[in-house]
Image (cartoon, rainbow, N blue to C red):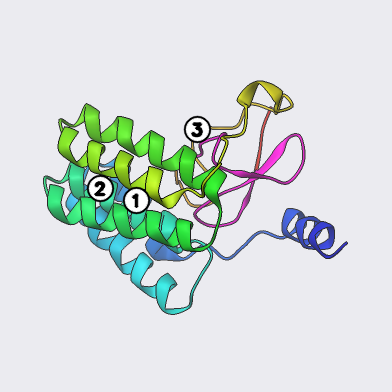
Amino acid sequence: MRRGFRRAFRQGATPNVPPLLKRANELMVAMDFAGAAAAFAELAGRAEQRNGPRTPFFYLQAGRTSILAGQKDAGFQQIKHGLSIISQRGNFQHLNKVTNRIINELKQHGMNKEADELSIWLKAALPIGFTPAANAQAPKKAALPTYCSSCGAPVRPDEVDWLDDVTAECAFCGSPVRGE
């Protein structure tokens, strides 16, 4: 009952989006990856001090933008830290999805050694007997917009928390994102 109440509450409330998060996403759109990386790293550090639920997403985005800015080593360390936080929190289905997406992105950027390292790390991080959820069995959800209207962050339908069949929660700001 408590979870249902929380979801109903979140669905009706629009979170206060930090200006730095909006700015970080604006910098991404403007292709100022170094500026976006600094902003996401600052957001990640602040969130980690509070043990905030969005901490790993900020670290993953800081790592991604650092890589796009040419700071591959720093970016890879931030990505690993974000994935470690997801692993520590025990959300293994999400960890599996996100890590596999990141492995593909690293390969696209020619970072094959790092992709292989993450692949090995993931196998060790997942519990023995872990089975990924089958996508074919998931109910059909509404098509979501590409970006959150509140903070401008990318919305990945397979990585969001769905509040109902047409509404998901932005992984970065917690705002409800309605599909069509």
User: Extreme front residue here?
Assistant: 128
Q: In the shown orientation, is residue 58 left or right of residue 115?
A: right
Query: Which of these two is toward me, 46 or 114?
Result: 114
The residue under label 2 is which amino acid type?
Thr
Q: Are marks 2 and 1 in contact (CB under 8 Å)?
A: yes
- Does residue 76 lie above or below 9 as drawn? above
Image quadrant where residue 35 sits: bottom left
Query: What residue appears at the point 17 percent right and 56 percent down from the top-left corner?
Result: 74
Query: Which element is circle 3 on?
Result: loop
Q: In the displayed structure, would residue 54 be above or below residue 167?
A: below
Earlier-in-chain disc, 2 versus 3: 2
Question: Which residue is denoted by mark 3 in the rendering?
Answer: 146
Image height check: is 115 above or below 180?
below
Q: Quadrant of the C terminus?
A: top right
Q: Which residues are magenta?
A: 154-176
The residue tagged 2 is 65
Q: Where is residue 61? Give x, y as percent.
A: 34, 50
Q: Position of residue 160 (x, y in %)?
A: 58, 43
- Judging depth in this view, the residue of 124 and 141 nearest the camera is 124
- Determine which residue is flagged by label 1: 61
Mark 2–mark 1 distance (CA, rounded to whole Å): 6 Å
Q: Is residue 50 left or right of residue 15?
A: left
